[in-house]
Image: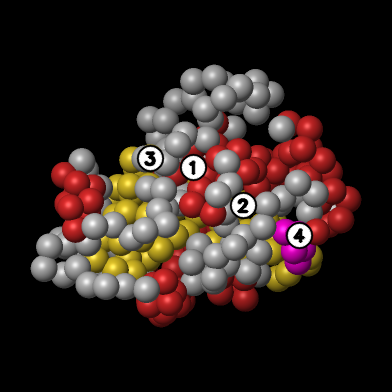
Amino acid sequence: MLQKIKESAEFLQKKTNNQPKVGIILGTGLGGLVNEIDIKHSISYKDIPNFPLSTVEGHSGRLIFGNLGGKGVVAMQGRFHFYEGYPMDKVTFPVRVMKLLGIENLVVSNASGGVNPDYEVGDLMILSDHINLIPNPLIGENIAELGPRFPDMSEPYCRDLISKAESIAKANNLPLQKGVYVALTGPTLETPAEYNHMRIIGGDTVGMSTAPEVIVARHMNIPCFAMSVITDLGVPGKIQKVTHEEIQKVSEVAEPKLTLIIKELIESI
């Protein structure tokens, strides 16, 4: 696995001659941040050695190199999920590659379902913590060159980056939620009983991504920041049938607010 990571990183370094400082993972319907990037290189996943392919509608499947907020960035326009059938080392493979490319911070976005009764559709939530119920991506042989066998997870999301994002939102009069994200395998959306269970165990939102990438990033000692767009509600009395297309539409409406916060956050790093 380490050899494949190095092969991908070396290919991208030769192709781009870039050393990005910030890695970005863009989730469902949130790819518009790319429009804010001064793009130097755009490379399809299918052209990168050892890279998996994104199969989800709304995930473009490109790696973008450029500048955003005065910083060199590499952005995943489309991520990978366990429910697509990929093993966890493939789901998190791009984060490993970004580390070898030189990133010093990871910024992640996603769409999620709110189980906190105080949340509404369209809200933005900063992840303060997560509960990972997807198989842990570090199961298996540990690659000591990348990180320790038993990495600490007492601060999965960087408190300094969270504080900066909160200040940016306040300065721009953008209301924010802050809470715990529960990562599930999918691809089914949750039953009412499952939503209730997630709330009981301490969750504020549920989704099918993010935690694996963050676990791998923290394994490599990369500070992380993540935000969710609340696209539907798993709250008793507010649960409705929802489609992936509807989730995308809500994400797209919330996207300008999320884009503003992330752009200014990267400027402040």
User: Looking at the image, do the residues carrying marks 1 and 3 touch, with CB atoms under 8 Å apart?
Assistant: yes
| Sequence order check, earlier mark of 3 and 2 | 2
Q: Amino acid at mark 2?
A: Gly
| Sequence order check, earlier mark of 1 and 4 | 4
Looking at the picture, does residue 155 appear above or below residue 18?
above
Q: Please, what secondary structure does the residue beneath circle 2 have? A: strand
- Disc 1 versus disc 3: distance between alpha carbons? 8 Å
Q: Residue at x 65, y 24 (%)?
A: 143
| Sequence order check, earlier mark of 1 and 3 | 3
Q: Amino acid at mark 1?
A: Pro
On the picture, is 144 further left or further right than 218?
Answer: right
Q: Please, what secondary structure does the residue beneath circle 4 have? A: helix
Q: Determine which residue is flagged by label 4.
A: 46
**Percent x, y of residue 134:** 42, 41
Q: Please, what secondary structure does the residue beneath circle 1 have? A: helix
Quarter of the figure with the N terminus: top right
Q: Determine which residue is flagged by label 2.
A: 23
Q: Determine which residue is flagged by label 1.
A: 212
**Percent x, y of residue 17:** 85, 53
Q: Determine which residue is flagged by label 3.
A: 132
